[in-house]
Image (spheres, rainbow, N blue to C red):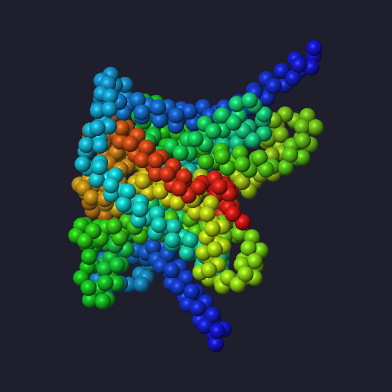
Amino acid sequence: MDDALVRAGRALRLALLIALAALFLIPFYLLVRNGLASEAEITAPDWTLFPRDPHWSNVRELFADPDVPMAHALLNSSLIAVATTAGTLLLASLAGYGLARIPYRHANAVFYAIVGTLMVPAAVTFVPSFVLVSSLGWVSSLRGLIVPTLFSAFACFVFRQYFLGFPRELEDAAQVDGLGYWRTFWRVVVPNSRPVFAAVGTIVFIGAWNAFLWPLVIGQGRDSWTVQVALSTFTTAQTVNLHELFLAAAVSILPLLVVFLFLQRYIVAGVERSGIDD
Amino acid sequence: MSAPGGERRRQRNRTFWFWTFVGPFVAGLALFTYVPLAWSVYLSFFDAHNTVSPTDFVGFGNYTAMLGDPAFRSSLLTFTVFTAFIVPATYALSLGLALAVNRLRFAQAFFRSVFFLPAACSYVVAAMVWKMSVFNGVRFGLANTVLGWFGAEPVAWLAATDPPWYWLVIITVRLWLQAGFYMLLFLAGLQRIPVRLYEAAALDGARPGWQTFRHITFPALRTTSVAVVLLLVVGAFQAFDEFYNLLSGARGYPPYARPPLVHLYYTALGQGQDLGLGSAGAVILALIILVVTVVQARWSGLGRREEY
């Protein structure tokens, strides 16, 4: 009797979880359904579960539409996300290693000056950052979209915490071989730290691909639009081509879904390692 | 006397390498975070229309102007209420998901992935799906289609101010986007709780379920909880992306549900280009966030270790 009750409770919980999971997947379903439908099917009063014959021609139409610089926006977003990820990893890992391993009198002060910026909300700096970037003449350029975002205190913090726990014996062996800090870092530390690079890299990549406020402020010319800015422009426009809009959105999240599928364990590790709960 | 000289040389050598590793990062951080921060505070004391090197010192004029602006005041008030609602809601949902997923004996990875998947979505894409499909105000929107099955009239979700249905749209999109990420943090926290705690509790006669949760799980998750609430609060006050994409249209942003950041965006970078006023608003917002987070950290005892 009691056993049956427990089993019923478990089944109920599972049913609830499945229902929630289905609810969470609906937006993805809508992206695909609307992206492959004709305009008439989307706006029809009766709901069609899925377009009877998917309009794959929508893809060609989207990339041929002169009003939607989708191909160019995808290129911009890719360049920005890759460059931001590579640059952030390089700068933050070097700084994190220096802070963790090279004895220096003021290392602590430098460390606090870095993590202190984590407390500064982006809201305070985006206006003067815009002013600074515009006085450098970087508005509407990829430089303006990439360079100011390369200095991530979060990434530096994660690397420092990780390197503090890096096995010293490996580095000692390298020093016995006569390698200095620089070569020890590149030949011994980096090759043995791939998971942390993957974890920080995926998180930075996702953030760069999905960023909106900064690209909106800096990417003013059409040529410097990222995917997010392009999508937003059409979402907030007066008239829209629904099927094109949904297809564009679906295309924009494809790269990230691939990243998610293959690198999820690194993301999970990165979230856990971010140390905010340590 | 060669030993101290060698020591000094070694120290100079270390200093050189320290700055070789750390220097580029610190230089960039100084230029792109510290300089704008200082500049922002400087500008906030000047009349800076369309200029970044103002000469007209106005003292606290921008601050009083900003605080005297009913639109900015109502935006701050609205977002305090918004924060007070979205933070507990997201907290409860993500903790609930984590507990449910953690107990699964099969398909754990599947459910974890499904709930985490929205984190791959940008706020722009999510806002677009919500605005154009889920909560589209016309008859073919998903929510209105479902309402139609029950014979209800379609609702103009985003344009409806009485009752303010747009909040339902805003709250659900943020919940959908964030719950999975925080679920992951809670899952990590749950996995760190030693099993012996539960064994001891069972020996003491605690029944599984609510009792165990209240006396074991919840206290053990305190550090995670504090971090999650902190991140949620800071995020709520800085909301921009989904509001901008849900509500602004060809005629600009409606007067309701205006996040402080949207207000600053239009003040500083819109028609007026009033950088002094915008900077003052940014400093006010930052101070509010700072006060709220410090109070919250104090109140919840951030820094104390988890009690095992």
Residue A101 in which image quadrant: top right
**Name of the residue lying farthest toward the front:** B204
**Can you give x and y, in whole percent of width and height, for residue B167 in the image?**
29, 57
Above or below, A240 relative to A20: above
Let me know if residue A29 appears in the view. Answer: no
Q: Residue furthest top?
A: B1
From the viewer's perspective, is residue A67 above or below residue A135?
Answer: below
Give whichever of B13, A146 is nearer the camera.
B13
Q: How many marks?
A: 0
What residue sits 22% from the left and 65% below the top? B155
Q: Quadrant of residue A138?
A: top left
Q: Is residue A216 left or right of residue A15?
A: left
Relative to B186, is B296 on the left or the right?
A: left
Outermost residue, bottom direction? A1
Residue A26 falls in image quadrant:
bottom left
Expressed as whole percent of the image width and height from the top left, the position of residue B246 reads 29, 53
Residue at (64% x, 35% y) in the render = A100
Position above or below: B296 against B36: below
User: In the rendered image, which quarter contains the N terminus of chain B?
Assistant: top right
> Residue B305, relative to residue A133: is it above or below?
below
Horizontal and vertical percent for residue A177? 80, 32
Q: Which residue is depicted at the point 31% across and 59% down?
A: B169
- Of residues A38 and B223, which is closer to you in this image? B223
- Confirm whether residue B6 shows in the render: yes
Q: Residue at x 50, y 74 (%)?
A: A14
Q: Quadrant of the C terminus of chain B?
A: bottom right
Q: Position of residue A97 (x, y in %)?
A: 63, 35
Between residue A128 and residue A42, name the one nearer to us.
A128
- Please indicate whether residue B218 sits to the left or right of residue B41 in the image: right
